[in-house]
Image (cartoon, helix red, strand yellow):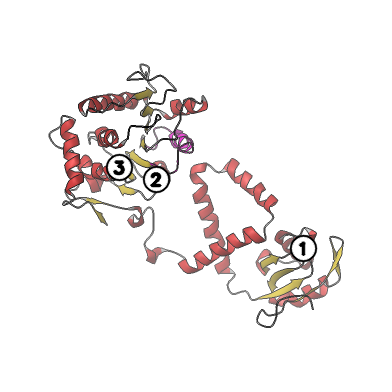
Amino acid sequence: MVLLKKEDSRYHAETGSLIQTAGHLQPSLLQQKIIPLILKRKNIAVETLEGSGKTAAFILPLIKLISKGKRGIKAVVITSNSDQVKRALQELLKYSERGNRELTFWAIGYKKSRPRQGVRPGAFPDVLIGTPDKVIDNIRRGVLDFSHLQIAVIDAPYPDGQPGFIKDVFFIFSKFPQKIQTLLFSPSLADRNYTLISLLSHPYIIPADKWQKQFDEVIKPEENKKVQNKKENIPFNHKIAVQTIGKIIKRIKEEEDPFELNHYRNLIKKNVPLSLRSYFSAYLFKQSLTVDTGNKGNEFTRLFISIGKNRRIFPKDLVDLFASKLNLTKDQIGLVKVLDNYSFLEISSGVAERAIAVFSGFNYKGRRISVNYARKKNNSSSSAS
């Protein structure tokens, strides 16, 4: 559990000063909890309620944090509808005037929206406020430059309120620099909006029931049940999982056919939404661990095969060859390693003798191949007998 220490007087004093400058007597419970975190430049995902002072909670520290200097957009506020755009702009104008900050703004997404403080579209204001569709429209027109962006705010709708919101936000974030402060405000951190948290690096996740309490407590993602299960509930051995990842990366670099992998990459890119690709990968990895665990009882024998990359051989080719000629299932074939002049293949021990008999002298891709038991590593390096 991460505590906002009451003795951290600097950030609490700054919060009080910002609230008083805005014309309020004291901060709301929400503002008490999150403004100090924002001032510390933390990434946060917070569940909000009506009347909790949400807009001021991000506008006030935003005005203080963005630095003047180089010409360009320093902060972006993405909100769900024209009313929210107008409200955010009004708050920004009011608080910046009271705080004596000479900032330029541009609001896009409602009928009377226009550049403020002498800013023209494409003239790179300090703060951009808009709905996703309008922001994307201006991105495609090439009038927005995010190279100096420091802070991004996502003011999300209810999960069922705007189906395309999440997809649009992910597209917009693909145009942002990687190292920025990101603030997510949402009426619900469950369901569809929860995927937006993946845009935040090491975020503080603050459910509504946490900031409504009187003590200063927030939850980091590592301690949130929705983000990470407790260790005792993890259904696999962590060490084995890490080792498996290493093996997979090694196979990709050394053994797999890059043309074939690119085919699958393009297939995934076309059919799996960007926001779900990491989950898609995690699911496939989970399935591979399950398969490996299920095959743990199988005993494999390592065979040497006198053909390799010099004949444009890839692991899949050998798997298909052995499976078809010996009527094997994929579970009866283990690891395959293809080197320049020869290869190694693990096969179920019960069919190893038959494989050697069938494939010794077999004509494959214009060359007679030999298959034999691979030598043990501690005896000598594996080679043809």
Tag 1–tag 3 contact (CB < 8 Å): no
Q: Residue at x 51, y 68 (%)?
A: 240
Q: Earlier in the sequence, mark 2 or mark 3?
A: 3
Query: In the rendered image of this protein, does residue 303 appear above or below residue 314?
Result: below
Q: Position of residue 167 (x, y in %)?
A: 47, 36
Of pointers 2 and 1, the one earlier in the residue sequence: 2
Amino acid type of disc 1? Leu
Crowding near the residue tagged with mark 3, few <14, some 14–19, many ≥20 C-alpha atoms within 10 Å: many
Residue 60 coordinates in the image, percent (x, y): 25, 34
Where disc 3 sits, the SS reads: strand
Residue 117: x %, y % from top left: 32, 20
Magenta segment: does it hold 288? no
| Number of the front mark, 2 or 1 | 2
Q: Nearer the viewer, residue 230 or 43?
A: 43
Task: Inspect the image, locate mark 2, and give the three-letter code of the amino acid beneath it.
Answer: Leu
Neighbours of disc 1 within 10 Å: few (<14), some (14-19), many (20+): some
- Frontmost residue, 191 versus 90: 90
Place residue 256 in its image quadrant.
bottom right
Tell me, for residue 200, which label it has, or none.
Answer: 2
Task: Point out which mark residue 164 bears.
Answer: none
Q: Point out which mark residue 47 bears.
A: 3
Q: Are marks 2 and 1 in contact (CB under 8 Å)?
A: no
Q: Secondary structure at mark 2?
A: loop
Q: Residue at x 40, y 48 (%)?
A: 201
Magenta residues, start to end: 158-180
Q: Amino acid at mark 3?
A: Glu
> Cβ–Cβ below 8 Å for labels 2 and 3?
no
Left or right, residue 48 beside residue 18: right
Question: Which residue position is annotated with label 1?
Answer: 321
Q: Residues within 10 Å of mark 2 (few under 14, many from 20)?
A: some
